[in-house]
Image (cartoon, rainbow, N blue to C red):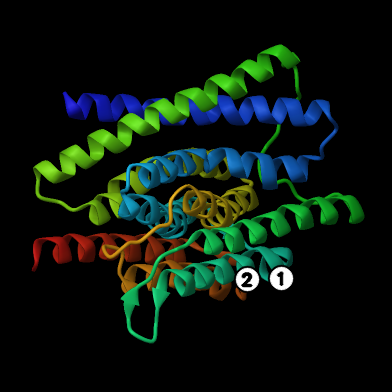
């Protein structure tokens, strides 16, 4: 029965995120917010709502491994898994703006999280305190401000998410936002409970399940958005969605989670953070070539498989 509920909650997560994003886009367009800001900020935050809900609930329940592992695992899966799989079928282009701002910022916030999460002088985990959460939220606020500033002061830029012509009345858009958020919260709450129960029944710890099953499950909206964008031959949308979501995951989600409850995580190791940073650096390296080709995508996907195998081997004590 737990497996049935797990599948139903995953479906609820995806459907809830879709309703939330659709309603937010409709409201934003009625207030003449540009397509760039809608894609970079509103939709990016919307597709990160499952991670937000799972991490905050994990923090409230005292499961710091779930709160942090969900973000670290999602960021790894977003780049190595989703972009790798996307590039195998549709090579992903990386433009100059990505190289100048979004990708370096993604690397920077990954390094910042690692610095906050670990005391490298002793090699032991340290708390992500409420003060650390304020730092992360300040970075998030700066990123959002700059997105609006750049949108207002520069020429029209590429969208990061396809936006259809708005035909949704305001009352329906509001219902979608409220209903989607409610469905996300309830679905993610059940998802965390059942995933942890299943993991513990197999003797799996919270860190492993959060880095794998929960992380991949909460990244389903990003997967759907990236595959859809790539199928429409606009791989820049897929890249923007992933990089933006990774920035939101660290700055907004862990920032809010730390304000709810200071986070400690002995189960998430230095190697997990290193893989997260390395995945972002890999985007920068591919950027010098201007795209992620099919061979590069296969390398990224294989890297994610090897990392997952490593986690399983470490869990089983191989």
Q: Residue shown at 67%/37% (left/top)?
A: 162
- Residue 161, by quadrant, is top right
- Considering depth in this image, is 84 or 185 the residue closer to the camera? 185
**Residue 178 image point, x, y percent:** 58, 22
**Residue 113 image point, x, y percent:** 49, 67
Q: In this view, does 178 lie to the left or right of 2?
A: right
Question: Callout 1: few (<14), some (14-19), or many (20+) C-alpha neighbours within 10 Å?
Answer: few
- Image quadrant in which the N terminus is located: top left
Using the numbered discs, state the Cα–Cα distance from disc 2 to disc 1 in whole angstroms: 7 Å
**Relative to 23, residue 212 above or below:** below
Per the rendering, the mark at residue 75 is: none
Q: Is residue 75 left or right of residue 167?
A: left
- Considering depth in this image, is 184 or 310 the residue closer to the camera? 184
Q: In this view, which residue lies farthest toward the bottom?
A: 121
Residue under pointer 2: 104
Q: Residue shown at 54%/68% (left/top)?
A: 283
Residue under pointer 1: 100
**Residue 190 image point, x, y percent:** 31, 29
**Relative to 99, residue 68 above or below:** above
Q: Is residue 33 left or right of residue 231?
A: right
Q: Residue shown at 36%/48% (left/top)?
A: 215
Give the tally of numbered discs.
Answer: 2
Q: Residue shown at 45%/38% (left/top)?
A: 53
Circle 1: element type: helix
Label 2 with label 1: CB-CB less than 8 Å: yes
- Image quadrant in which the C terminus is located: bottom left
Circle 2: element type: helix
């Amino acid at each position: 029965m737990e497996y049935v509920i797990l599948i139903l909650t995953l479906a609820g997560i995806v459907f809830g995120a879709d309703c939330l994003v659709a309603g937010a886009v409709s409201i934003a367009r009625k207030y003449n917010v540009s397509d760039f800001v809608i894609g970079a900020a509103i939709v990016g935050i919307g597709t990160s709502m499952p991670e937000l809900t799972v991490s905050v609930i994990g923090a409230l329940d005292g499961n710091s491994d779930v709160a942090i592992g969900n973000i670290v695992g999602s960021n790894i899966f977003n780049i190595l898994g989703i972009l790798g799989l996307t590039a195998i079928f549709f090579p992903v282009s990386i433009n100059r703006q990505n190289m100048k701002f979004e990708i370096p910022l993604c690397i920077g916030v990954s390094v910042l999280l690692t610095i906050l999460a670990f005391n490298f002088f002793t090699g032991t985990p340290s708390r992500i305190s409420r003060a650390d959460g304020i730092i992360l939220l300040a970075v998030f606020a700066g990123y959002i401000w700059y997105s609006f500033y750049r949108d207002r002061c520069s020429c029209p830029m590429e969208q990061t998410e396809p936006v259809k012509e708005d035909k949704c009345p305001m009352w329906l858009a509001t219902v979608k936002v409220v209903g989607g958020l409610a469905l996300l919260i309830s679905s993610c709450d059940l998802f965390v409970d059942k995933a942890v129960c299943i993991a513990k029944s197999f003797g799996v710890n919270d860190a492993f399940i959060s880095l794998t099953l929960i992380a991949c499950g909460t990244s389903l909206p990003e997967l759907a958005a990236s595959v859809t964008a790539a199928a429409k031959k606009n791989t820049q949308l897929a890249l923007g969605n992933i990089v933006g979501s990774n920035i939101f995951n660290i700055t907004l989600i862990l920032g809010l989670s730390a304000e709810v409850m200071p986070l400690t995580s002995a189960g998430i190791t230095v190697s997990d953070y290193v893989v997260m940073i390395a995945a972002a650096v890999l985007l920068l390296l591919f950027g010098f070539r201007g795209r992620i080709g099919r061979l590069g995508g296969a390398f990224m996907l294989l890297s994610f498989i090897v990392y997952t195998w490593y986690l399983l081997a470490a869990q089983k004590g191989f």
